Amino acid sequence: MASNEKKSKEEIKKEIIQFLNITSGKVDHSPDEFSCGNIHNTSLVLATCSKDVPRATPLEFFNEGLIIYIFGQAGGKILNIKRNKKVAAAIYEQPLVHSRIQKNLQIFGVAELITVKNNPELFREKAIKWNQYKVVESLLKPVIKRQNLSEEEVEDLVKRGTEATFLIKIVPNHIILREMQEDFSIFKSEWKKEKE
């Protein structure tokens, strides 16, 4: 694997952020009746571990610069993060097309779990920014329709669905950017967080 020595740390950081901006989920500003409220792009695979048992979960993600945010429900990944905040993630372009340069990221960092209860301001800010209230309502449409709920019951259901959601914030400390070239060579660049 070739190493791309010519890039500065700032250039590498800028390339990583550009890749995250392109691959992350987006708000659907022109939704149709089949839209959940977001435009889905590339998935991230989140790796967590607890008691020597690894877990990999494909998830949609959003980013602000290098910081990654994931909305998720309770499950193994959340339990693992509660026990071990160190996580890794991978993001790679699909489908693989050999006629152009393709990038992928390997991310190592620390996760923080944010909820309506432990940090309501931050949770609400990010949920509004990435349209999660609309997404929750869209996901609950079958239940709302089947049970013929009133407006107050729908609001309560959306509120309970939101309260059961976790916002996973990942602050990276090391990111590897790989660029697969048309000739099958691979350039590797690394970004590391400054030591505090």
Image: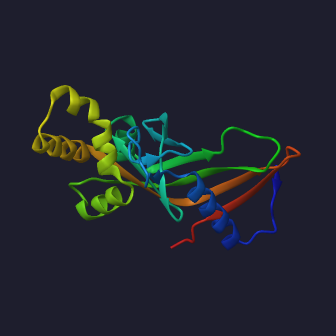
Which colour style is shown?
A: rainbow
- Left/right of residue 63 with respect to residue 186 in the rendered view: left
Residue placed furthest toward the right: 183
Nearer the observer, 111 or 67: 67
User: What x and y, as percent, mark residue 115?
Assistant: 27, 53
- Does residue 21 sit above or below 60 in this rendering? below
Give the residue drawn at x 55%, y 71%: 195
- Left/right of residue 157 with respect to residue 107 in the rendered view: left
Q: Quadrant of residue 75?
A: top left
User: What x and y, as percent, mark residue 22?
Assistant: 59, 55
- Left/right of residue 186 with respect to residue 9 in the rendered view: right
Nearer the observer, 195 or 130: 130
- Does residue 20 sit above or below 14 in this rendering? above
Nearer the observer, 73 or 171: 73
User: What x and y, as percent, mark residue 148?
Assistant: 15, 30
Residue placed furthest toward the top: 146
Give the residue drawn at x 59%, y 63%: 17
Query: Looking at the image, how many numbered discs can be counted on the residues?
Result: 0
- Does residue 23 sit above or below 189 in this rendering? above
- Left/right of residue 26 with respect to residue 182 in the rendered view: left
Nearer the observer, 84 or 140: 140
Give the residue drawn at x 32%, y 59%: 128
